[in-house]
Image: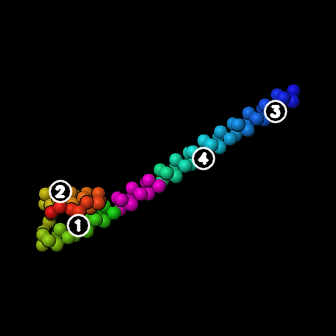
Amino acid sequence: MIIGQEWIIILFGVVIVFLLYIVYMSLATIAALLERVDRLSGQVDTTQSLQVRLARDLSQISGGAPLSHSDLKELARIAEEYNSGQQPSR
């Protein structure tokens, strides 16, 4: 009967170690996802601030006139180039 009890204790130990491993892997995955979300939200903030700056520059260039649809498309293209790290082409 002692041998049976030892196997039950070993089995419970293995189950506990396995569950701890699952929790560890879940926490590592969650931490990686949170880091990626933080990085992506920083990129969104950067893109939005660039768009605001570019819109201000563009409205100053246009003399304060309302922006046309083509101006907005050009602004989006330039912002995308800035966001991708390329030097914007004019």
Q: Residue at x 21, y 62 (%)?
A: 88
Amino acid on which disc 1 is placed: Leu
Amino acid on which disc 2 is placed: Lys
- Camera-side mark, 2 or 4: 4
- Camera-side mark, 1 or 3: 3
Coordinates of residue 30 in the picture (x, y in percent): 52, 49
Element marked by disc 2: helix
Q: CA distance from mark 2 to mark 4?
A: 46 Å
* CA neighbours of label 3 inside 10 A, class few (<14), some (14 to 19), many (20+): few
Q: Residue at x 20, y 70 (%)?
A: 57
Amino acid on which disc 4 is placed: Tyr
For residue 24, side relative to residue 66 (left or right)? right
Q: Which residue is mark 1?
A: 54
Looking at marks 2 and 3 on the same chain, the residue that comes earlier in the sequence is marked by 3
* CA neighbours of label 2 inside 10 A, class few (<14), some (14 to 19), many (20+): few
Looking at marks 2 and 4 on the same chain, the residue that comes earlier in the sequence is marked by 4
Q: Which residue is mark 3?
A: 6
Tell which of 18 and 75 is nearer to you.
Answer: 18
Q: Which residues are magenta?
A: 35-45
Looking at marks 1 and 4 on the same chain, the residue that comes earlier in the sequence is marked by 4
**Residue 79 in view of the camera:** no
Q: Which residue is mark 4?
A: 24
Contact, CB < 8 Å: mark 2 with mark 1? no
Q: CA distance from mark 1 to mark 3?
A: 72 Å
* CA neighbours of label 4 inside 10 A, class few (<14), some (14 to 19), many (20+): few
